[in-house]
């Protein structure tokens, strides 16, 4: 391979895995001379294709762990498990998902940042890779110096969701929010989450004065909306759309530049008058900053191929993600850009993680 990733398309590649080679050798010993010659030619061809693998000294030399900062069954956990088996096939070693929940994923991110075994990666949400230290200066790792970006895996807009009692038209909801002043509440899954910061951005853009009410998670936010305790929230499409389609909540608009197949029929906020308001949630794979660049590149190339496979793409879509599969450089740019955009909101509103 060339060692470069085209962020728009990646040409799939093949390697001969250790299991395949062992199978070939076993068959070679059991068959006659003609069979041996054919198998030898296959091994030579496989070695030629997999040249960059051998040039890296046989890395990985043992199973890798993919650390996730959230419990089994969570969205990041499901994404990690969708990647683990195909990544193991691509790298020739098992990939074990290890859950280390706590502190919004920052405990796991710190585990990855401190790893020196060259066989540890992390599946992280955007907050872990951008604003973690801005929200809490005591965060033990710095995403820009202690972690190495590998690949952006999936992105999704948020859905500005409203209680069913509110008007059906998006413009009317925006106007009602301005008229309500501080009589409206908005929910989020916690202080410093993207949903919280995004709503503060939205308040600045709309003139709303809705009061923030944090909850342990999005399921509790949805329950509060259904009970009338909060009027609006920014929710992931996978959670918002079932409620919208059942008529229990209303979808006002998406925080993306345009419409998304993750939320069919829902306009962007730009379409309803909020020009330039864009915000996405995303997840990505990162490594310790000490992992050699050629190994980071190899994992990034493998992931770019994996997320474009129809079965993996569909699996991630069903989890609420549009696949990306970028180069390390593209993920680094995304980290810098998002941090710069969100920093002003965090500082203006004095937001600190609890």
Image (spheres, helix red, strand yellow):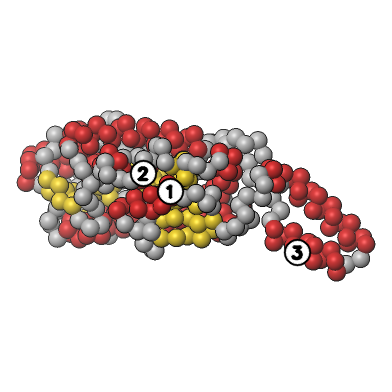
Q: Earlier in the sequence, mark 2 or mark 3?
A: 3
Q: Give the distance between the C-alpha atoms of the residues marked 3 and 1, in whole angstroms.
A: 38 Å
Q: Position of residue 336 (x, y in %)?
A: 38, 33
Q: Are marks 2 and 3 in contact (CB under 8 Å)?
A: no
At label 2, counting other C-alpha atoms closer than 10 Å, the crowd grade (few under 14, some 14-19, many 20 or more) is many
Report the residue at 69% width, 58% height from top.
Answer: 18
Mark 1 surroundings within 10 Å by alpha-carbon count, few (fewer than 14), some (14 through 19), many (20 or more): some
Residue at point 36%, 40% (across, down): 142
- Image point (56%, 46%), residue name: 299
Name the outermost residue toward the right.
33
Q: Quadrant of residue 269?
A: top left
The residue lying toward the viewer, choosing from 286 and 254, is 286
Q: Residue 274 at x, y = what percent?
A: 24, 33
Any mark on residue 141, and which?
A: 2
On screen, residue 328 above or below 96:
above
The quarter in which the N terminus is drawn is top right
First-in-chain label (3 vs 1)? 3
Q: What residue sits 67% from the left and 47% below the top?
A: 57
Instruction: State whether residue 231 appears in this view.
Output: no
Look at mark 1 in the image and give the residue it sits on.
114
Residue 44 lies left or right of residue 124; in this view the side is right
CB under 8 Å between callouts 2 and 1? yes
Reading the image, the residue beneath label 3 is: 23
Task: Kindly identify which numbered label has been placed on residue 126.
Answer: none
Residue 291 position in % (x across, y down)? 52, 43
Name the secondary structure under disc 3.
Answer: helix
The number of discs equals 3
């Amino acid at each position: 391979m060339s060692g470069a990733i085209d962020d728009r398309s990646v040409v799939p590649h093949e390697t001969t895995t250790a299991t395949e080679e062992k199978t070939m050798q076993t068959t070679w010993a059991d068959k006659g001379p003609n069979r041996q010659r054919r198998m030898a030619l296959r091994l030579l061809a496989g070695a030629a294709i997999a040249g960059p693998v051998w040039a890296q000294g046989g890395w990985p030399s043992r199973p890798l762990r993919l650390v996730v900062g959230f419990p089994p069954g969570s969205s990041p956990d499901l994404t990690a498990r969708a990647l683990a088996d195909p990544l193991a096939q691509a790298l020739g070693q098992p990939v074990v998902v290890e859950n280390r929940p706590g502190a919004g994923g920052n405990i796991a991110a710190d585990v990855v940042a401190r790893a020196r075994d060259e066989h540890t990666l992390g599946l992280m949400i955007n907050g872990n890779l951008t604003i973690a230290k801005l929200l809490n200066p005591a965060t033990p790792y710095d995403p820009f110096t202690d972690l190495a970006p590998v690949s952006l895996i999936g992105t999704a807009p948020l859905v500005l969701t409203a209680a069913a009692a509110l008007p059906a038209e998006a413009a009317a909801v925006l106007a009602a929010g301005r008229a309500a002043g501080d009589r409206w509440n908005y929910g989020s899954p916690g202080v410093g989450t993207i949903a919280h910061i995004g709503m503060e951005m939205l308040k600045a853009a709309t003139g709303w004065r809705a009061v923030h009410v944090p909850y342990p998670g999005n399921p509790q936010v949805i329950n509060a909306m259904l009970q009338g305790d909060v009027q609006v929230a920014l929710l992931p499409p996978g959670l918002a759309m079932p409620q919208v389609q059942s008529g229990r909540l209303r979808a006002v608009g998406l925080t993306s530049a345009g419409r998304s197949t993750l939320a069919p029929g829902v306009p962007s906020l730009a379409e309803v008058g909020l020009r330039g308001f864009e915000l996405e949630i995303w997840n990505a794979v990162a490594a310790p900053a000490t992992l050699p660049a050629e190994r980071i590149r190899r994992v990034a190339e493998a992931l770019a191929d994996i997320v474009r496979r129809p079965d993996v793409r569909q699996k991630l879509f069903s989890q609420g993600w549009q696949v990306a599969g970028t180069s390390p450089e593209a993920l680094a740019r995304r980290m810098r850009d998002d941090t710069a955009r969100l920093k002003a909101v965090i500082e203006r509103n004095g937001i600190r993680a609890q």
